[in-house]
Amino acid sequence: MEPEHRAVLRKFRVHLSDQLLVSDSIVPFLFQEGVLTEAQVEQVEGQLTNKQKNLKLLDILPNRGPRAFGAFLEALQDFSWIRDQLLLELQNTPSAGTPGQNTPGTGSTGENIPAEHTGTGSPGEN
């Protein structure tokens, strides 16, 4: 996961832990996409409260590779207001290094973000 993505998750950690219901769709989607292992799913699901499950997921997610943040955004389809907040924060965060990369259709590091995640209505380049 890119440093900018980690920073956004850290900044919204408390908000995310209060708002999400990860067991319903987020964890299963991340497992399906290969972002989480079966053991990590069990670690998350083994927590007693929703908030603890959310915090456990947020502890694991930053170490799950370059696809983790994008897959997490996709998993937030039932929480579009949260996804939009994360994307807005990412767009407003200066890119470390190269200016001008942070445009609709790409993330702060130039990775493609599906059009439904950019709010532009046009797909990013592949």
Image: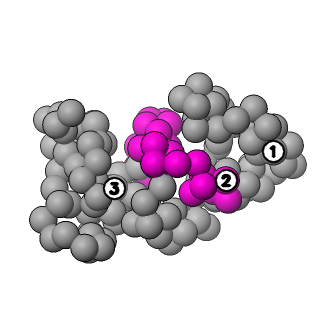
Residue 91, position in %: x, y?
A: 26, 63
Q: Would residue 71 be seen by someone viewing this image from the given angle?
A: yes
What segment carries the magenta color?
Answer: 58-82
- Comparing labels 3 and 2, the label whose residue is closer to the camera: 2
Between 38 and 91, the residue placed more toward the observer is: 38
Q: Provide the secondary structure element on which disc 3 rests.
A: helix
Residue 88, position in %: x, y?
A: 30, 60
- Comparing labels 1 and 3, the label whose residue is closer to the camera: 1
Spatial distance from mark 1 to mark 2, Cα to Cα? Answer: 9 Å
Task: State yes or no: discs 1 and 3 in contact (Cβ < 8 Å).
Answer: no
Q: Dot 3, how many residues are within 10 Å of its Cα: few (below 14), some (14-19), or many (20+)?
A: many
Reading the image, the residue beneath label 3 is 87
Amino acid, disc 1: Gln
Reading the image, the residue beneath label 2 is 60
Reading the image, the residue beneath label 1 is 43
Q: Would residue 79 be seen by someone viewing this image from the given angle?
A: no
| Sequence-first disc among 3 and 2 | 2
Quadrant where the C terminus sits is top left
Residue 114, position in %: x, y?
A: 28, 37
Q: Where on the picture, by quarter, is residue 120?
A: top left
Which residue is at 16% across, 56% downward? 103
Classified by dominant secondary structure, the portion drawn in magenta counts as helix
Which residue is at 19% across, 38% downward? 124
